[in-house]
Amino acid sequence: MKMKLFQTICRQLRSSTFSVESAALVAFSTSSYSCGRKKKVNPYEEVDQEKYSNLVQSVLSSRGVAQTPGSVEEDALLCGPVSKHKLPNQGEDRRVPQNWFPIFNPERSDKPNASDPSVPLKIPLQRNVIPSVTRVLQQTMTKQQVFLLERWKQRMILELGEDGFKEYTSNIFLQGKRFHEDLESILSPQETLKERDENLLKSGYIESVQHILKDVSGVRALESAVQHETLNYIGLLDCVAEYQGKLCVIDWKTSEKPKPFIQSTFDNPLQVVAYMGAMNHDTNYSFQVQCGLIVVAYKDGSPAHPHFMDAELCSQYWAKWLLRLEEYTEKKKNQNIQKPEYSE
């Protein structure tokens, strides 16, 4: 009797359209639910503990933490979004500046002429009440960016202490300043780098940009101030030179973490186009620039990442810069911004 019952069940299974594969899929899709009721599974048991231990160490150690503001985006990726809800300003990219002003000057050429100085321009920054590019960008960060930046600061203070954090930020500033000074010495035609050559090559940052410097020529400005009289802002650009035959506003940046994509450079593209638009309409300059270049150098000497910005991309970022500038102006009218500090 039992044998007949078993044979009947086998025949029914063979004739059924329900395949073993589909049954396995169903069992898999419901396993998390059924097992959850029977046994509580610890999700951390399947995590690569060594991998994430190294990640945490790289975030908390002073050697592994990237300098701000570039770390804001990295913080968002590592720690997750601030809120599960959509941000209220997601339509920002669709907004159009109310007071449009062109980034390029139709009355100027990007070709050199006989009247251009043979020595790179180095116009000093005038200290006045006009806001700087850096100040505008700092004062118009989104609430999410401000929150992430403050969280990074508090985490660093917790790890290093108040004095340690001040020392860390001071060292970052001094490293960047020295890097720019070394680049200025290299790119200045009147400089003779005899005794400083060996010391410069010992710098990881300088070693990092060696392959970039081979494509840089025709330097026209170094550490030179720009002012946009119409839009009312000032800035101090790093360099104007030809990169692979195209005249660019070049911005040198340092980082301890790789930034292979321009999106990783935070507000640096806005900074570049702000300098570019000001310079193209500044009477101290007889030429104009239509391209930008952000070079991210690394302390360990690994090859720097160049982020080239053509005229079309610069125009897109220019519209975003105008929006930030309008936001700053509106905040200033509402007396929410104190007197500008000059941190270019």
Image: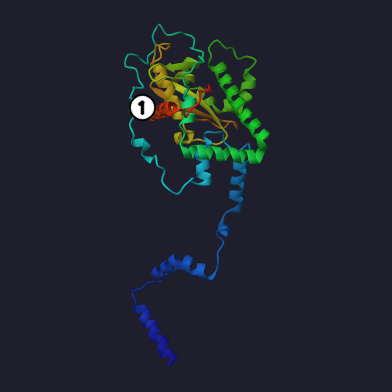
Viewer can see residue 307: no
Circle 1 crowding by C-alpha within 10 Å: few under 14, some 14–19, many from 20: some
Residue linked to disc 1: 315
Q: Nearer the viewer, residue 154 or 253?
A: 154
Disc 1 element = helix
Q: Quadrant of residue 11?
A: bottom left
Looking at the rendered structure, the number of numbered marks drawn on it comes to 1
* Above-or-below relation of 192 to 135: above
Name the residue furthest bottom: 1
| Image quarter in which the N terminus is found | bottom left
> Is 151 displayed left or right of 216 in the figure?
right
Viewer can see residue 208: yes
Residue 200, position in %: x, y? 61, 21
* Above-or-below relation of 223 to 92: above
**What's under tag 1, amino acid-wise?**
Ser
> Is 33 displayed left or right of 299 in the figure?
left
Indicate the colouring scheme: rainbow
Q: Residue at x 47, y 8 (%)?
A: 118
Q: Residue at x 53, y 28 (%)?
A: 253
Name the residue furthest top: 115
* Above-or-below relation of 78 to 37: above
Residue 27, position in %: x, y? 44, 69
Residue 301, position in %: x, y? 59, 30
Q: Residue at x 40, y 86 (%)?
A: 7
Residue 106, position in %: x, y? 31, 16
Q: Residue at x 51, y 40 (%)?
A: 147
